[in-house]
């Protein structure tokens, strides 16, 4: 079961990397857009995050439900913004930087909320 937990953590990091790389890859573009990596990375984080909570509960590990709830809410906002703007040829800077900022915020919550 511990291997499954570690695998889920690994995949969760991969999802973060895809989401952040999609954002950073568009930083220099004249017209910013939502790339598939951002949506797929966010969805990967959603699925693996929920699975991690389930595995931690099964292993009787302490789960900080408030932290998980806040991280889930931030990720849902990221996914809603990305999904709603995925087909547009260009998105506004506000939406684009909100996605990037919320992505970094989610990592900060994961690291600093003990």
Image: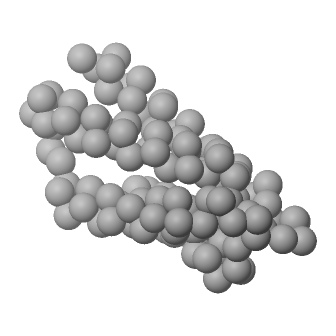
Tell me the quarter of the image containing the N terminus: top left
Q: Position of residue 26 (x, y in %)?
A: 79, 60
Q: Is residue 66 left or right of residue 20?
A: left
**To which quarter of the image does residue 71 belong?**
bottom left
Q: Is residue 59 left or right of residue 105?
A: left
Which residue lies at the image location 47% right of the left edge and 40% below the top edge? 44
**Residue at 17% over, 57% down:** 65
What scheme was used to colour the molecule? one colour
The reply to whether residue 75 is in sight is yes
Q: Front-most of 64 and 76? A: 76
Where, by quadrant of the figure, is residue 50 drawn? top left
Where residue 66 sits in the image (x, y, percent)?
A: 20, 64
* Closer-to-camera residue (103/94): 94
Numbered circles on residues, count: 0
- Vertical side of 65 occupied by 99: above or below: below
Give the x, y percent position of residue 83.
52, 59
Q: In this rendering, would 68 be left or right of 35?
A: left
Residue 114 in view of the camera: no
Q: Residue at x 84, y 71 (%)?
A: 31
Q: Position of residue 29 (x, y in %)?
A: 87, 65
Residue at image location 21% in from the left, 30% down from the top: 55
Q: Is residue 45 above or below residue 24?
A: above
Q: Note whether 21 is above or below 76 in the view shown.
A: above
Q: Where does the C terminus fall, quadrant-wise?
A: bottom left
């Amino acid at each position: 079961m511990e291997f499954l937990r570690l695998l889920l953590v690994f995949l969760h990091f991969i999802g973060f990397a895809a989401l952040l790389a999609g954002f950073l890859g568009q930083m220099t573009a004249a017209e910013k857009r939502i790339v598939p990596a951002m949506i797929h990375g966010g969805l990967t984080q959603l699925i693996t995050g929920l699975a991690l909570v389930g595995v931690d509960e099964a292993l009787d590990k302490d789960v900080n439900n408030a932290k998980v709830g806040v991280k889930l809410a931030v990720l849902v906002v990221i996914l809603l913004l990305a999904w709603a703007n995925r087909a547009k040829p260009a998105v506004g800077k506000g939406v684009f930087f909100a996605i990037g900022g919320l992505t970094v915020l989610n990592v900060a919550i994961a690291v600093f909320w003990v």
